[in-house]
Amino acid sequence: MTHNPDLTSSVIFGLGWLYLLLALLNIWWTARIMKGDPHRDKEAAGWGAYSGLLLMAALAHLTGSSSPEHFHIRMPNFIKEFIDLGAAPVPYFTLTMVLFIAVVVLRKWFVKETVGWVLLNLSVLFLALSMTDYDFRQIVGKPDNVPIVSMLFIVGFFTWLAFKRAVDNDERRAAGKPLFEQEKNEKILVWPDLVYSELICMVVVTVILTAWALLLPAPLEEPASSAQTPNPSKAPWYFLGLQEMLVYFDPWMAGVVLPSLILVGLMAIPYIDYNKLGNGYYTFNERKFAILTFMFGFLPLWVGMIILGTFLRGPNWNFFGIYEPWDAHKLEVLNNVNLSEYFWIYWLQARIPVAPSGAGELTKILFILQREWLGLLLCLFYLAVVPFLLAATIFRSFAIKMGFIRFIVFSNLLLFMASLPIKMVLRWSFSLKYLVGIPEWFFNI
Amino acid sequence: MASVGDYIRGSQIWKSIFRHPAPIDRRNRIVVMLTNFFLHLHPVSIKQQGIALSYTWCMGGITFFLFLAETVTGVLLMFYYRPTLEHAFNDILALRDVTTLGVMREMHRWGAHAMVITVWLHMYRVFLTGSYKPPREFNWVVGVLLLVLTLLLSFTGYLLPWDQLAIWAITVGSNMARATPFLGHEGPGFQLLNIGGFDLITNASDARFILLGGRFVGEMTLNRFYILHCVAIPLVVALLIAIHFWRIRKDGGISQPL
Ligand code: HEM
């Protein structure tokens, strides 16, 4: 393999602007603290010193003081190796889940302004240092991937903002005070207040879009050729979560049934959620279950799997660390086993039932059903019996308030959503391929 | 200067267009909202918190603005682009290398990506403020349809440059249709749809075939996606946005705590 330089003068120069931006942001932050509260002068001094360091880093980048080989501000190798070591689906999903739970549990702490600012700084620094790695740049710097990187920051920011408002309102409720949205809520005229903010908003969006368009050329690859399949072939980035599901489900589930159910499920939300509270204001405590379910679907499952599909899946849809070169010959041993094979071969020590050759259609069907009875029964149990078990136990109050039909729809949608993480865990822990494997009918679950 | 301004505002042409004096006093600020076609989408007065940036994040508004920007840049691109195997790729190449306003392609592509992100965030906000609850249930449903159509707009547009990135992304995406239960020729249950032993669903008649206009991504696909992208979907989106906005007003404006 050819050796590509991790750093070039133009990369260093580009990163200089990023450090300069971060330094300016932190100078603004320092000034904000000083103006806001004279008692926080020690803290302000700390931020001031940090801004100075950033400014120096920016200068070191922008002046091109040393040659790229001898440039020292880069991601240390041991960190890269450490991160790539854990690069596999299981640690990735565990990490996203841990982050998600941590944010929810520690929300009072997470919404503090200083915490948010520190997290922002850490993630920008991580990005800047990572950009000194050749392979990281190859994937993050792809023009179509730039919006995904910015989406990460934007989604992070708005999650932070929503939690901040929710925590604030929950505290107001506990103290018997009016909600934030109820304070200072006079009627005002739409002209000028709304019309002008809309105008400003349009100008800002236009400026951002124009700058983005001028700075970053749209991708154009070789002319289309049906003879040359690129490896990996990836769907457009917003569908990569669905493509990632193909690892765990067959196309009819991952590409048709589950996406349709996502849409049906989204449309059903207003008719399922009987909770009257939390309409028109941010809150967490008043609608814990609804918010947790939605956020779980949106953050780790949807956005998380897009990140995974975009940045971490390489040739042959193998998993690659963020600093790992995409090697098309990397081998991943796939030894996945069907439930029917587990049942007949491992547990009963018997042969898998196969219809004798020349058997009639009906006999064939019966043999298939005999072979797969356990998986079929499990799936039936999951969709038809588990809802009643839930209704009798943890979702008792839901079932009573929702009524029969609503609850059945709700629990089935929830179970379909849960089927993805369940299948993932089964795959990781038992190398389970299909619960029901009937390739004869293209019916694999 | 003031007199020139006054002269223009006093002219018959100006008055015929705006029908009232400039919105500088309370009365005319109300009148402008009622008489201007574009502004009449809005109410005359509104609760302060309903338009607070930290409440709505302005994401629905930005999505709408991006839709308009996509329409304008898209129409300009249509002047240059021909959806045929012979021309498609070269026309895009020319946009990059020759055409003066070629940057329209960048604006259109990045605007599309941005619109996907803002529509997600808009949904996220609407969920987190519980704004889908009565009486706004139906507007949420309209919103979900808009979400799907936004994604489909992006998806159909992705094919048009006709480069390797385009056709393979569409191939991967549309391969799913092959596995549609009953209606795809590799989907569960398609064998049930047969008459006297002849399968109704084959690779030349299934859901994927209808989507692509062929057995693989080819010239007919380009044609179909072009029409979907430039005509069919935008029309439906425009209609749904109109309904969406109308319902916001009818449902009592932006949601508020009781
Ligand atoms: C092309 C896509 C869309 C456009 C242009 C659009 C536009 C808007 C605008 C301008 C508003 C006013 C308030 C605001 O800006 O937040 C709004 C409100 C609303 N949108 Fe959308 N929207 C779109 C998609 C969606 C989606 C995907 C959903 C949900 C699934 C949705 C559900 C709603 C609801 C329920 C409201 C009322 C919110 C409230 O009263 O607080 N919309 N939409």
Image (cartoon, coloured by chain):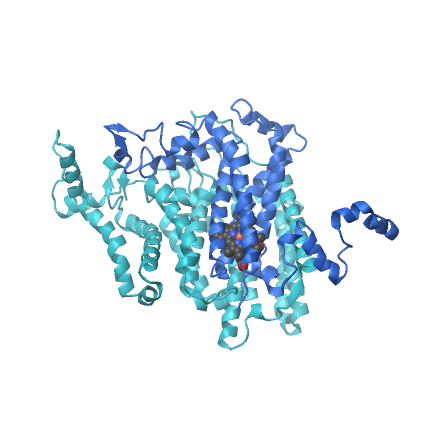
Chain colours: A cyan, B blue
- Along the viewing direction, whichever of A72 and A165 lies nearer the viewer: A165
Q: Most extreme residue toward the top, as rendered?
A: B86
Residue A399: quadrant of the picture: bottom left
- Along the viewing direction, whichever of A434 and A20 lies nearer the viewer: A434
B176 with respect to B147 (left or right) = left
Compared to residue B11, the image places residue A293 above or below, namely below
The answer to whether residue B116 is seen in the rendering is yes
Query: Percent position (x, y) of residue A187?
Result: 64, 66
Total marks drawn?
0
A11 with respect to B21 (left or right) = left
B168 with respect to A215 (left or right) = left
Query: Percent position (x, y) of residue A70?
Result: 58, 44
The residue under the point 68% across, 55% down is B34
B118 with respect to A246 (left or right) = right
Query: Percent position (x, y) of residue A205?
Result: 63, 48
The C terminus of chain A, quarter of image: top left
Query: Percent position (x, y) of residue A199?
Result: 68, 52
Compared to residue A325, the image places residue B133 above or below, namely below
The answer to whether residue A82 is seen in the rendering is no
The residue under the point 20% across, 50% down is A377
The residue under the point 38% across, 36% down is B177
Residue A359: quadrant of the picture: top left
The N terminus of chain A, quarter of image: top left
Q: Most extreme residue toward the bottom, as rendered?
A: A176
